[in-house]
Image (tube, rainbow, N blue to C red):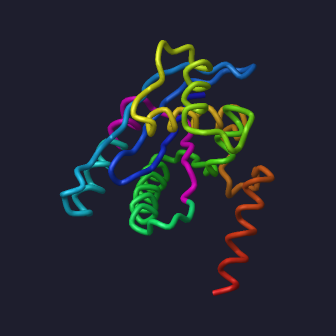
């Protein structure tokens, strides 16, 4: 199965494409980070990243998309940019009939390193080892995108979250989101 992993961001959007086979075998197809200049207006930045995402989907023909779930931070503008690009990814995947599965950062870390609290350097190191690369992909967003794709290959398969094929962590995340909405 060919999987496109996306680490969404408005300034840098990591794109990692892997091929996954049985017995936890994965191989690198492509890795990059699409960028948009911070001094450009937001609609133009979104369009630029959407073009890069479409180009990757057209060139590499993934069968599934794995996307990092937006999580709350103190920096609202970062969350907004991440959410905006996540929406673009979901739209483009939907138009191509591709299943999209969302993963929390801790799920990705746990899948790749065995520790849901692993640091970026640990994730990068494991991505490098798992994919038998000479060096860790740069920037970190690119390595993170590969980690997201690997997590999907090893944990999620092709079933989208909406189908009910969720992990315990995904169900806990959804319950926490529902509880937060009720408190508002």
Q: In percent of the image, x 26 and y 63: which residue is there?
A: 42
* Image quarter of the C terminus: bottom right
Q: In percent of the image, x 48 and y 23: which residue is there?
A: 136
Q: Is residue 60 magenta?
A: yes
Q: In percent of the image, x 64 and y 41: which residue is there?
A: 108
- Residue 50 vs residue 181: left or right? left
User: In the picture shown, does residue 157 fall above or below 172?
Assistant: above
User: In the picture shown, does residue 93 fall above or below 58?
Assistant: below
Question: Total number of numbered labels?
Answer: 0
* Image quarter of the N terminus: top right
Q: Is residue 158 magenta?
A: no
User: Hey, which quadrant is residue 65 in on the image?
Assistant: top right
Q: What x and y, as percent, mark residue 38?
A: 24, 55
Q: What x and y, as percent, mark residue 117?
A: 68, 44
- Residue 178 vs residue 150: left or right? right
Query: Which of 135/29 is in front?
Result: 135
Q: In percent of the image, x 41 and y 51: which residue is there?
A: 9
- The region drawn magenta spans 54-70
- Residue 159 vs residue 167: left or right? left
Query: Which of 10/49 is in front?
Result: 10
Q: What x and y, as percent, mark residue 98?
A: 53, 45
């Amino acid at each position: 199965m060919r999987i496109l992993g996306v680490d969404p961001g408005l300034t840098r959007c990591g794109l990692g494409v892997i091929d996954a086979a049985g017995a936890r075998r994965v191989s690198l197809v492509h890795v990059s980070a699409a960028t948009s200049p911070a001094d450009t207006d937001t609609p133009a930045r979104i369009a630029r990243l959407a073009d890069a995402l479409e180009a990757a989907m057209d060139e590499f023909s993934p069968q599934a998309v794995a996307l990092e779930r937006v999580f709350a931070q103190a920096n609202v503008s970062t969350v907004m940019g991440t959410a905006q690009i996540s929406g673009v990814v979901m739209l483009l995947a939907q138009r191509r009939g591709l299943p999209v599965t969302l993963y929390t950062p801790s799920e990705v870390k746990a899948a790749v390193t065995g520790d849901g609290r692993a640091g970026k350097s640990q994730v990068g190191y494991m991505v490098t080892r798992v994919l038998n690369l000479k060096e860790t992909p740069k920037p970190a967003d690119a390595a993170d995108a590969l980690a997201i794709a690997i997590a999907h290959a090893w944990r999620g398969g092709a079933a989208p979250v909406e189908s009910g094929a969720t992990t315990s962590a995904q169900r806990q995340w959804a319950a926490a989101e529902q509880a937060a909405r009720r408190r508002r």
